[in-house]
Amino acid sequence: MVFPGDEEDAAATSAGDAVVLEITDTSSSAAARDPSSPRPPPVSISDLARFDPLPSPTVAVRANRELLLLPRAPRRQLQGISWTLSVCSESGREHVNVGCDLEAAVQVLRYLFEPSESFNITHNNFLLLLEGALFLAVESLLVECERWFSTIASQTSAIFSAPLDFIIEVWDFAQEHGVTFVQEICREYLAQNFAHVISRRSFNKIPYDLLCSTIECPHLTVDSEKQLCEAILYWVSENMKTCEQSYPNSVDGHLFLLSKVKICLLPLGFAAGTKRHWFDFGNNIVCTILDLLKDSLKTLLDAIADGNLERYCIRITEYSKNIVLSGCPQVTTAFLYISVLPTDLDVSFKRRIVSSYTQVDHRSFILYNELEKAAKTLSFKNVHMVDISKCPNVHFGAAIDWLKLFFPELRIFRVSHCLSFQFDDLLYLLLRCPWIDEIDMTVDTSTVTPKHSVVSSSSEVLSKVKPNQKRYGIHCPPYDRQLNSIFLNISRLTLEGRSDIDDVGLLEISVLKNSLCYINIRNCFLLTDDGISYLLMKCTKIHSMVLSYTSFGNRSIQTLCATNPSGHNSVHAHVMAFYMQELHLDGCKGIDSAALSQLMSIISITKFLSLRETSLTDGALCKFVGSSLEYLDVSETVISMVSLAPVIRRNYKLNCLKTAGCRSLLLECDNVENISGNKYGDFLQEVGTTCCLEDVEMGWGFCPIRIEDLAPSFSKVRKMTIGLGTALAENVMCALPMICPFLESLILRFQVISDRVVRNLLESAVNLHVLCLHYCLGSLTSFSFQTKAPALRVLQLHWVTPWLTNDDLTILTENCNLAELSLSGCKLLDSNSQDIISSGWPNLALLHLEECGKITVEGVSSFLSCKALEDILLRHTGRGIGRSIIDDAIRELPLLRKLALDLCDACEEGYDSPNNAEGKMIRSVRMSRCKTMKGSCLEVPRQGSSRPVHKDTVVLEWSSRRLTTTIVSERV
């Protein structure tokens, strides 16, 4: 009989006597071989790789007796083999029986005797090799397994090269067999990649011991403390039920994980939200944060004295890429510095840092040189993004020094909704950190816009002025001549809502002419067409602009469309508009139709185009020949399908289309030249044959009759707004969850709805986050909302639920976890509604209540306990709001940015102006009064007055430098 592999093993056999190793699988799943059955035919080691699967339960492998006895196996060192194998080889027996895991033994034999270039360790064979190496005592293989596993776990793309399921399986094996090096690598791997690991489906399957050791690892890397807390809460929630049923004593152990969270670094809004399901834990966090807000200096100094400063240090490691502190009003500049300094600093130096940087003064700048020396030995080169948005207690001059010292590779800096970040701070940032690529300093849009009719306006300079240190003494005129070579990296700049930036500011920004590619100056009302035009003349590399609701007009368009703008060194003709990739001109009333036509005839590679509320006509849109559009907004314009249809046909990549308010959409216009015979279909026909939309906003012209009309092109829609000018049939509305399985946001205005429609949406649209019903008709009842909607976060019910009672509100709190609630016309609500809202949704960030019964007839104390609130509107909700409401709200709600009140609800003849709003988050306060009121705007109407009609509004508005008081002759 000739066995497979005889020829290739002839040389080996002649070198010494052959021995057959009979390896019997001892795993629980293998069936025992019948002793009376014949022995399996032996095969060579080289043939083992050809079996898939291996014959079971026994495999006979032919080997060389002398090679088994050598201290060195062929090509690789074999330092030891099991005692049984060695003794049997020396005894001269022709057959040696070995009982072990068959797969593992075969992998080890292949490793030992196959050429090294033909055998690799992979995810598929790692555990088998490791198990075989342990059983057969092959130390060289153990070393190689350790080297391979360490390499895989340390790669930059480790999260993809080492799947989480594999890490868990390896950990379980290492725990069972006491393989410490594997346990340590698993722990380090999860710690370094924790920010990515938590998004994996199998995260909740991580064993408790592994998760606990990972969290305690000094290399634990997360973007924020919120990210860590969310992950632990999710893991505990998923594992709690099993533990309560199987191992009651382990519940406390799982909750122990929460003690590892540095609760003082959690965002206040998130902390308030945890009270919904983890009341004691969440309440403890909120109290801790509020205590820090009262006196963080004392708290930090006490922590230094107790040797417990670590709990206040931001988690920043050598592997950190992002640092996110957004929404943490308790964080001061001292928190930033203590988090990046060596832990072995002496106590006195720590106290100096905390004292100096809690309230920045001249001592901070004395310390700077000492800190600069420390930074030479401790910098974080992997950090690319820092977000300190909504952190009003950070001194940004000192924070910029912090960025300069410790983050030499920083690329993105976000500081949105921070009024204290002034324009001078931006200039200082550009000077100190020229390597930054993207800056976002967005603030809320000004309440008073140019379209409002202003009765009177006055302003005052804020009393809080920064120290006039030399470090901040930057003079702008020399920038363009002397410092231009530095600014080569700032390519994206967002100044949205910065109503205090004027043309002089734009002139200073033009120093970025060699690098600036994207600018967002949306709602910057002080800018003029001339100022914007000058910026475009200087910064000719700009290809993306958000200019909505500015004075951008004809002059700026002429600059965009001019050939060879000033300062461009190209030898070829260059028209800036031709290279526009993103252009938002919403509400730019300074553009006439001729200028807009000229612009449309040139832009051809634009991907994002927004012309809402402009003078766009069919004639202008017909001149657009681009075919790269992904986003198009032509809402509130006079265009028709004559011009829109060809655009849709050409742009097959279009995924966002907004045409709400286009009343002429279905009308033919005689003044437009024929295009391809002027043949076009209806709206749905054009969209359905070309696009696959994700975001749609429709009104006039959008009239689907059959479900089939929507199904093809709306199958990927995530956001949908249906407004005036169309009416969706009930069967179409009920089918929306089926037509749009990914639907996340639905806004319906002036539609006919029913319980069936709303209930089906809440039950079937499992991804629905936003539901807004405005002025809808139909037979809606409380039955609509008596179903679970765990994904819903934003609910707006405007004049659609007059029947809403406290009982209905209670049911809503049980079924939905809202972050934003807006109600209008719910006249049956009373003061008890406050407690229902505040206790049911402690994480509310926005609360708008209008014409809602008597909710505030006994004051607003319960609302002030919702510490996450950022935006409050209370109008005609009951006369019971005290004079000190503005001061009280600003003091009790650290994140509050917008407050709107009605003088009809004042119980004490009006409201007091705030005494100390500086350094807070507050952006605007609005106080409306009605025509039935007499006397000054701070008086309230007498009893028996007629139905109130708003007359004017007093607006208090804070910018980075000034407080402006404006009276507008309408409600805003």
Image: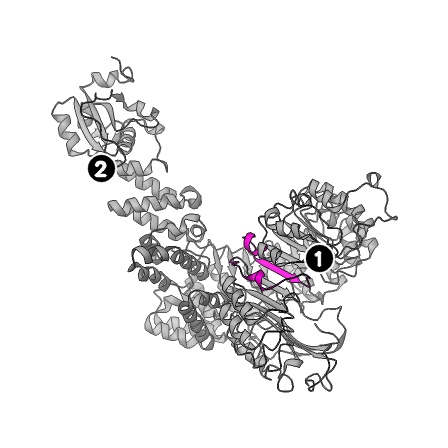
Image x and y of residue 755, in percent: 61, 59
Q: Is residue 867 left or right of residue 284?
A: right
Q: Dot 2 surroundings within 10 Å: few (below 14), some, or many (20 or more)?
A: some
Q: Position of residue 466 (x, y in %)?
A: 56, 75
Bounds of the magenta segment: 761-790
| Res 663 → quadrant | bottom right
Q: Which residue is mark 1?
A: 723
Looking at the image, is 359 positioned above or below residue 112?
A: below
Does 678 sit left or right of 158 as displayed?
Answer: right
| Amino acid marked by disc 2 | Phe
Picture coordinates of residue 967 (x, y %)? 72, 78
The one nearer the camera, 382 or 120, is: 120
Q: CA distance from mark 2 to mark 1?
A: 71 Å
Residue drawn at (36%, 64%) of the image: 259
* Residue pictured at 78% horizontal, 47% vertical: 641
- Within-10-Å neighbours for mark 1: few <14, some 14–19, many 20+: many
Residue 223 lies in the magenta stretch: no
Indicate the quadrant where residue 266 lies: bottom left
Which quarter of the rendering shows the C terminus? Answer: bottom right
Residue 611 vs residue 796: left or right?
A: right
